[in-house]
Structure formats: C-alpha cells, structure tokens
Amino acid sequence: MKEKGRSVIAQNRKARHDYAILDTYEAGVALLGTEVKSLRLGRASLVDAFATVDDGEVWLRGLHIPEYTQGSWTNHEPRRTRKLLLHRGEIERLIGKIREGGLTLVPLSLYFSDGKVKCEIALARGKKSYDKRTDLAKRDADREIQRAYGRAAKGRARELR
C-alpha cells in the first residue's frame, strides 16, 4: 500500500523569525537508504541548514540527519551535502534572484509527501533587529485584541441568560 498525504519530519521555526520570506519552492532531496530510514524515525535537524547554488545545481548544506542505528558500514555521514531536485526553470529563476543581492535560500521544512522526502525552501531576505521587534510588537497587539474580543463575548453571553 502506497503512502498518501504529507507528514512533517522537521521544521525551521527560527527561519521565519530571522528572514522575510519572499517566495517558496518544493524540492526533492537526493538521499541514501539509511538517511530515509533515519528520517522515517522522525530524526532530523534544520537548525544550521542553508541552500546554495553551485554550477547550476542547488545543494542543501548543514542538514543534520543522524546515523541510522541499525545501519552497518553502509551508514551515511550525518552532515553531508545533499542535492536538491528542482526543475531547470526554477533553478534559473533562483540564480537570477540570488544574483540581485541580499537574498538567500533557507530551508523551512522537511517532510514526506506521498512517501517521498521533500524540502520546502524559501527565497528570503534577512531581517534587521528592528524588523524583528516590530513583528513581535504586532503579534502581541493582535493577541491582546483577541483576548479583548473573548472577554467581550463572554460578557455578552452572561447578559443573554
């Protein structure tokens, strides 16, 4: 029976905090057998990961997939460079946008999609510290507004009884 749907293996939550996401792409990842087995156990870390474009190919660097415990001498190296599989047109578009300057490729999540490992990468621009503070202030203000709505709704519910 073939797997259906999408199950997330790892997410890079810090990326959305540190970068302004401009565009996202779904890319396949060229992996070894023991890497896939380790990922099926839900073991991966995108903390230090980033993507680069070298000689017309996109590479994922710094992704940590721990060694498979039941693996033998065929086991993989945990932090090896892995190739991302994208269409030629997407790669050309990425090369053009990265050359403009100030943009980088950041992996957002690693997941299984219909049994295949996919990586969601984003074309992003680094945020300054004041941008991060305004985002935090906006989120806090939105949260306070929702609390006020909740208190008002509870007050009205009591009046109706």
Image: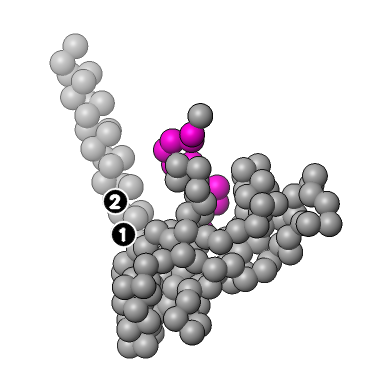
Residue occupying image coordinates x 32% and y 67%: 23
Q: Amino acid at mark 2?
A: Asp
Give yes or no for contact between labels 1 and 2 (Cβ–Cβ under 8 Å).
Answer: yes
Which quadrant does the C terminus fall into? top left
Residue 94 is inside the magenta segment: no
Q: Which of the two residues, 47 or 61, is positioned nearer the viewer here? A: 61
Q: Which of the two residues, 161 or 42, is positioned nearer the viewer here? A: 42
From this viewpoint, is residue 21 visible? no
Which residue carries the number 2 mark?
Answer: 142
Q: Amino acid at mark 1?
A: Lys
Which residue carries the number 1 mark?
Answer: 138
Q: Which residues are magenta?
A: 2-13
Q: Which of the two residues, 65 or 125, is positioned nearer the viewer here? A: 65
Local packing at callout 1 (Cα closer than 10 Å; few below 14, some 14-19, many 20+) is few
Q: Position of residue 86 (x, y in %)?
A: 41, 66
Residue occupying image coordinates x 37% and y 67%: 87
Residue furthest to the bottom: 100
How far apart marks 1 and 2 lie (CA) works out to: 6 Å
Q: Position of residue 1 (x, y in %)?
A: 51, 29
Instruction: Give the quarter of the image for residue 70.
Output: top right
**121 sits left or right of 66 in the view:** left
Residue occupying image coordinates x 60% and y 58%: 31
